[in-house]
Image: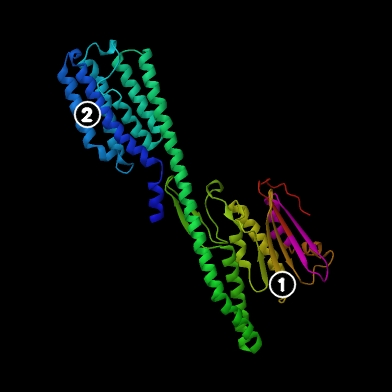
C-alpha cells in the first residue's frame, strides 16, 4: 500500500487541485474588486453584494472540497455549479444595463473554477456538460449570442475540455506506472526467492536423488520422486510462472479480470478475456521425463487459442507415454516468433513406422487426427509429425498470432 500511496502523491493530478484552490480564492477577490469599483452602476446593489457575500462564504467553506478528488463529490459539484449559474442569471437583476455593456457577470471568471472542478473530477465529458450549462446561462443573461459572449463561452468550453482530457491521460499513465512498479517489485522478490531456493531446497533435493540412486531399494524410489520435484521446482523458479487462479481489479474501470489456472475453463465471452501466457499452461507438464524450454518473456496468446494449443501439446505427450515406452524422455520447446507461436514436442522413443498414422486413423484411432491436427486446424495453424524409426518422433505445432479462422494447412 505504501507504494500505491507514493504513486498517487507523485501524480500530476494533485497539483492541479491545489491550483484550482488558489484560482477560486483569487477569482473571488477579483469579483469583489470589480463589484466595488463598479458599484455606482448597480440599480440593486443589495442583490449584487448579497450574492457576492454568499459566493465568498461558499468559496471559503468549500476549500477542503476542492483540495482533492476524494472530497469533491457529485453533490458538491452540482451545488457549486448552481452557485455560478445563479450569479450569472442575477447579473441583469442587479445591473439592468449589464447585458448592453461589457458583458461581465457578478461571479465573473470565478465561474470557470466551477467548470474546472468538473474537469478534474470527471474528465472531459463532465467538463463539456458543465461548460454547456454555463454557456446557456450566459446566453439567457445576455438575451442574444453576441460576439463577446461567444468568445468567452468558447474559451471556457475548450479550456475545460482540454484540462479534463489531460487529467484522464494522467490517470491512465498513473495506473500504468503503478502496475509497472508492482511487476518490478514482484520480479525482485521472485529473484530473491529463487536465489534462496537454489541455495537450499534444490540442492537438498538433488542430494536426495543422488543418495537414493546410490542406496537402491526404497531409497531409490524416494530419490526418483525428489528428482521429479527438483525439476518441477526448478522450472517454476527459472520462469517465474504461477499456474494458479488469481483475481485482479482494475479500479479505474471497475472491471474484474480473472486469470485461470491451467486447464480451467472460463465462461467469459472471447472479447472479455485478456491474453494469457502460454507458458503457464505448459509448465505443469515438466517432470523427470519431460524437459520444458521456453522464452524468458511471456508468450501471450488469446485465452481460447492458448488452451487449445496446450491441449494439443498434452495430446502429443500422451502419445509419447502410450507408444514410446515408460523410459522415454520428452522435450517441449516453445518459440515466440514474430508472426506465430511454435511448440515442438520431441521424444527419444522408437519412432512411428511409415504409414502407421494413416492406418490408425483408418482404424478409428483419431488421437493425432482430432486431438492434435483438429485443434490446430480450428486455430488456423499447422501440425507436422516427423518420425524416423529408431530415432524418436517430433511434433511441431504452429499457431498464427493473428487467427485466420479455420483455414489452416495440415501436413
Q: Is residue 392 magenta?
A: yes
Toward the viewer: 327 or 319?
A: 327
Left or right of 215 in this view: 89: left
Rendered image: mark on residue 183:
none
**N-terminal of the two: label 1 or label 2?**
2
Residue 246, horizontal then vertical, whole percent? 48, 59
Residue 125, horizontal then vertical, whole percent? 41, 32
Left or right of 100 in this view: 318: right
Looking at the figure, which quarter contains the N terminus?
bottom left
Task: Reply above or below: 138 against 250.
Answer: above
Q: Residue at x 61, y 75 (%)?
A: 228
Q: Which residue is mark 2?
A: 55
Residue 315, horizontal then vertical, whole percent? 68, 64
Q: Secondary structure at mark 2?
A: helix
Q: Residue at x 53, y 58 (%)?
A: 260
Q: Which residues are magenta?
A: 368-395
Residue 90, horizontal then vertical, whole percent? 23, 20
Q: Which residue is mark 1?
A: 329
Please say whether residue 216 is visible from this viewpoint: no
Q: Residues within 10 Å of mark 2 (few under 14, many from 20)?
A: many
Q: Residues within 10 Å of mark 1 (few under 14, many from 20)?
A: some
Amino acid at each position: 500500500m505504501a507504494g500505491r500511496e507514493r504513486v498517487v502523491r507523485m501524480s500530476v493530478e494533485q497539483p492541479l487541485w491545489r491550483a484550482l484552490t488558489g484560482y477560486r480564492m483569487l477569482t473571488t477577490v477579483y469579483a469583489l474588486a470589480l463589484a466595488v469599483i463598479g458599484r455606482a452602476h448597480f440599480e440593486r446593489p443589495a442583490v449584487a453584494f448579497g450574492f457576492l457575500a454568499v459566493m465568498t462564504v461558499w468559496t471559503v467553506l468549500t476549500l477542503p472540497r476542492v483540495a482533492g478528488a476524494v472530497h469533491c463529490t457529485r453533490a458538491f459539484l452540482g451545488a457549486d455549479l448552481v452557485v455560478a449559474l445563479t450569479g450569472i442569471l442575477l447579473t441583469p437583476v442587479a445591473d439592468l444595463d449589464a447585458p448592453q455593456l461589457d458583458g461581465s457577470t457578478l461571479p465573473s471568471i470565478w465561474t470557470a473554477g466551477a467548470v474546472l472542478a468538473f474537469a478534474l473530477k470527471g474528465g472531459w465529458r463532465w467538463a463539456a456538460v458543465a461548460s454547456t450549462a454555463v454557456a446557456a446561462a450566459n446566453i439567457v443573461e445576455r438575451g442574444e449570442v453576441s460576439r463577446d459572449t461567444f468568445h468567452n463561452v468558447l474559451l471556457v468550453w475548450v479550456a475545460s475540455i482540454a484540462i479534463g482530457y489531460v487529467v484522464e491521460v494522467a490517470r491512465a499513465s498513473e495506473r500504468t506506472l503503478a502496475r509497472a512498479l508492482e511487476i518490478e517489485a514482484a520480479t525482485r522478490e521472485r529473484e530473491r526467492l529463487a536465489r534462496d531456493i537454489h541455495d537450499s531446497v534444490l540442492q537438498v533435493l538433488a542430494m536426495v536423488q543422488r543418495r537414493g540412486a546410490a542406496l537402491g531399494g526404497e531409497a531409490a524410489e524416494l530419490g526418483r520422486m525428489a528428482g521429479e520435484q527438483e525439476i518441477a521446482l526448478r522450472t517454476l523458479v527459472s520462469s517465474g510462472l504461477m499456474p494458479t487462479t488469481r483475481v485482479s481489479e482494475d479500479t479505474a474501470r471497475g472491471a474484474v479480470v480473472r486469470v485461470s489456472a491451467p486447464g480451467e475453463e472460463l465462461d467469459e465471452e472471447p472479447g472479455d478475456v485478456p491474453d494469457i501466457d502460454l507458458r503457464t499452461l505448459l509448465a505443469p507438464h515438466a517432470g523427470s521425463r519431460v524437459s520444458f524450454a521456453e522464452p524468458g518473456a511471456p508468450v501471450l496468446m488469446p485465452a481460447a487459442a492458448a488452451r487449445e494449443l496446450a491441449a494439443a501439446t498434452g495430446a502429443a505427450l500422451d502419445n509419447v507415454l502410450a507408444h514410446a515406452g515408460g523410459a522415454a524422455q520428452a522435450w517441449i520447446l516453445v518459440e515466440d516468433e514474430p508472426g506465430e507461436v511454435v511448440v515442438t514436442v520431441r521424444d527419444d522413443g522408437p519412432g512411428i513406422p511409415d504409414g502407421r498414422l494413416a492406418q490408425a486413423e483408418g482404424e478409428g484411432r483419431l488421437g493425432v487426427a482430432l486431438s492434435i491436427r483438429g485443434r490446430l486446424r480450428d486455430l488456423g495453424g499447422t501440425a507436422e509429425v516427423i518420425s524416423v524409426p529408431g530415432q524418436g518422433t517430433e511434433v511441431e505445432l504452429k499457431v498464427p498470432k493473428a487467427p485466420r479462422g479455420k483455414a489452416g494447412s495440415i501436413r
